[in-house]
Each structure stands twice: as C-alpha cells, then as structure tokens.
Amino acid sequence: MNTLPILKTNKGMVFNGDSLELIPQLEDESIDLVMTSPPFALQRQKEYGNKQQNEYVEWLAEFAQKLLPKLKDTGSFVLDLGGAYQKGKPVRSLYNYKVLIKFCEDLGYNLAEEFFWYNPAKLPSPIEWVNKRKIRVKDAVNTVWWFSKTAFPKADVTKVLVPYSDRMKKLIKDAEKFYTPKERPSGHDISASFAKNNGGAIPSNLLQIPNTESTSSYLKLCKELGIKAHPARFPAKLPEFFIKMLTDPDDVVLDIFAGSNTTGYVAESLGRRWISFEESLEYIANSSLRFASNASEAKEYYESILSGNSITVTAPIQFNLFQ
C-alpha cells in the first residue's frame, strides 16, 4: 500500500480513503477473504451515505470488479445486503438479487452459496406497510452472498459446527433405541455411522444472529465519552462465522466499507491479518474504541485520530463476541 494507515494493531491496519482508490494499491492475489456490508440501497437517505436503488448495482459493481484480481484463487467475497421496498408502494426491490446476477454473469464471480441472516431482534419495518397499514410482515432477513473467485475456494465447515439438538444427543448416546440403519424412502442410505459424534452439527445457510449489543464495551465507551456509535453495525458473530469457515490463522481479511470496523476487530481476535478501508475519518476514530481497554485510552485514540494523527495499538485484543 502506498497510503499510510491511520490505525495499526498487531495484526491489522485501517486506511482512510475511497475504496475505489485504495483497492488498486493492494497486491494482486493477496486477499483471502473480503467480508463487508456496504450501505444498502434504501429509498430513504441515511447519515452514513447510501446510493439510490437505480444506480446502486453499477456503483457496487465498480468495487467488485477492482477486487477480483486482488483475491487469491482460493479466496472468497462475502457480501451482506439488507432488503428494501420500492418507493411509495409495498413491493420489494430486487436490487440485492440484481447485484448477485451482475457479479456472477458480468464480472466473473461464482456464487459459492447463498446465506440468509435472520435477525430476530430487528424492529418492524417499513413503518408504512407493517406498523400503520399492517399489510406486510416484519423484514428480518438479510441476504448474504458468498462469492468466490474459482469454483473451489478455501472452506472448512468443521470450524463452524453448531451444538447438536437434544434429540441428536440422545441418538448418539443410544443409537439403537432411535433408528435402524437402512435406506429411507427418499433414497438416502442412513448407515450406523450416522450416530457418530463429530463434535457438532453442520450449520445451515440460515444464520440466526440477533443484532443486540447493548452491553458491549464498544457501546459503553461510546456512552461514557459522549461519542455517537456508528448507526449501522452488524453483530460480531456474523463475520466470525465466515472468517472461521473461510480462512486460516494469518490469512488476510479485507473490509472495504469498514464503518465501526467489526470485521477487523473479529479478524484480529481470531489471529487473522486484516485490512480495513473507511472514507470517514470520524468513523475510524469511533472504531478505535473497539481496541481500547479503558475510557482514558479510548479518548486518547479517538482524539488523536480526529486530529489527523496515526496511532498504533500494541496491546493484545481481548475478544468479546458482543463488542
């Protein structure tokens, strides 16, 4: 990178600038995972900036086109996109699906798998159709597209196994009591190895992660210092899932719309190297609170960055999933 980082840690760096200008400075085939959540294509303008739906797909495609040569052949690009309605009517926008088609058919990405992030804590919206007229249900699911450069990106599902159900635990404990190995009517051959304890169950592509972090140290420090938290943060468990599944320690994780830098923070905690791009200096200063151990340190980081200085955090990061 020709540009100097604003914030450095033991494993990562945050750069201030337009990602369209910063991405070309990356070495080709140097990135293992791009994990990001760009401003969504909402009809209502948000304070963190978002494009209108009619220009969103082409706008986002510019970033994706520049990123493709920077990904390793084993690399992945995970993109979190929230849904939206068309302006003035209770009809869903197709922008997030148009992004999917654009990336695959025009830019050359592969859709490794589609994921859906279900946030049970999401407030009912949009107000007009859900709360007032009551003709639509709450929109509580984001589409998360897992793109890859080739058909065989690095991936290991055994790193993200989920706890067995109570029924499966009973089956493992006493398999003969619950089932007889044989071919099922569906054609599946359920053998005796089905009852083997593999340490957990394979997760589905529906990720249930509530976006609640009211007790996080990040929010506590924001409140204590009178600093407004970033208005659009995804929960740490979302990037954690994909970083664990798609990378190994010391692999490089990139977020081109860093915001409050949840991705960088989680990557650091998991022993991955990371790079974050963010256009707003204020958001970078805000994100530095994630790496502070107390209010005094947080204030020092925040004020230093806002003054245009670069900072280095050398203390090890204590990972808290709710931060």
Image: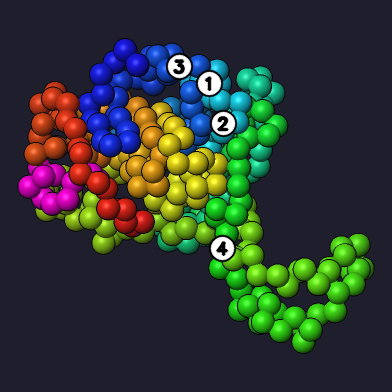
Q: Looking at the figure, which quarter contains the N terminus? A: top left
Do labels 3 and 1 touch, CB within 8 Å? yes
The crowding category of the residue bearing disc 2, from other C-alpha atoms within 10 Å (few below 14, some 14 to 19, many at least 20), is: many
Q: Which mark is residue 27?
A: 3
Q: Give how far apart the Cα atoms at labels 4 and 2 are.
A: 24 Å
Image coordinates of residue 91 in percent, x first then y, are 59, 43
Residue 165, image quadrant: bottom right
Residue holding disc 2: 75
Residue visible at 43% across and 37% down in the picture: 250
Q: Secondary structure at mark 3?
A: loop
Q: Is residue 168 visible?
A: yes
* Tag in front: 4 or 1: 1
Residue visible at 17% across and 26% down in the picture: 310
- What's the magenta bit mostly, secondary-structure-wise? helix
29 is higher (above) or lower (below) than 171? above
Q: Which mark is residue 162?
A: 4
